[in-house]
Amino acid sequence: MNFKQFLSSIGIGSMQIDTVVERPHLDEGETLNGTVYFTGGESDQEIDYIELNVLKQIENYREDSDFDIIEHTVAKQTLEFAGSVKSKKTVMQQFEIVPDERWILDAPKAKLILRTVVHIKNGVNAKDEDEITYGVQE
């Protein structure tokens, strides 16, 4: 059984950010647990905070719309981050998100996405996303 699954990797300059969850395929009643790892690069990097968003994406092509994919946020968590990631050092931040009935997919072309957004002090926010599953799989 694979308890740690690499999900996301964001490179900011020379700093690397990895989001790892224990299980990306959750049954009803289970909790999404994981860790965000920051590995410092050549210089210190100031981070304001981290956002974890679980999104329900629905592919819905319509001729009268400019958008083929509709997103709904079903869970959001903000992780405080005090200080900076020092050069060549690794820092980790754990998280836990409790699913609810909004995570259940009710459309044939729907999927759940875990999006990690890192807010950099005086810099450009970085984000990455990967698919997770919840509940009964077809």
Image (cartoon, helix red, strand yellow):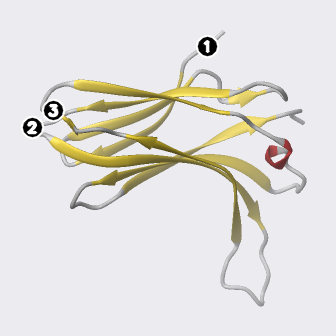
The residue to which callout 1 is attached is 2
Viewed as shown, does residue 82 lie left or right of 44?
A: right
Instruction: Point out which mark residue 42 bears.
Output: 2
Question: As drawn, which residue projects farthest toward the left?
Answer: 42
Q: Could you give the CA–CA distance between mark 2 and mark 1, rounded to whole angstroms? A: 32 Å
Residue labelled with disc 3 = 86
Which residue is found at the position 86% from the left and 44% from the top?
101
Dot 1 amino acid type: Asn
Instruction: Tell me the crowding category of disc 1: few under 14, some 14 to 19, or many 20 or more residues within 10 angstroms, Cα based.
Output: few
Q: Where residue 86 appears, x then y in whole percent?
A: 15, 32
Q: Which residue is painted at 77% across and 90% down in the image?
A: 64
- 54 lies above or below 83: below
Q: Is residue 12 left or right of residue 97?
A: left
**Residue occupying the point 71% across, 27% down:** 31
When the figure is inspected, residue 68 is found, relative to residue 133, above or below; the finding is below
**Nearest to N terminus: mark 2 or mark 3:** 2
Q: Of discs 2 and 3, which sits in the foreground?
A: 3
Q: Residue at x 14, y 27 (%)?
A: 88
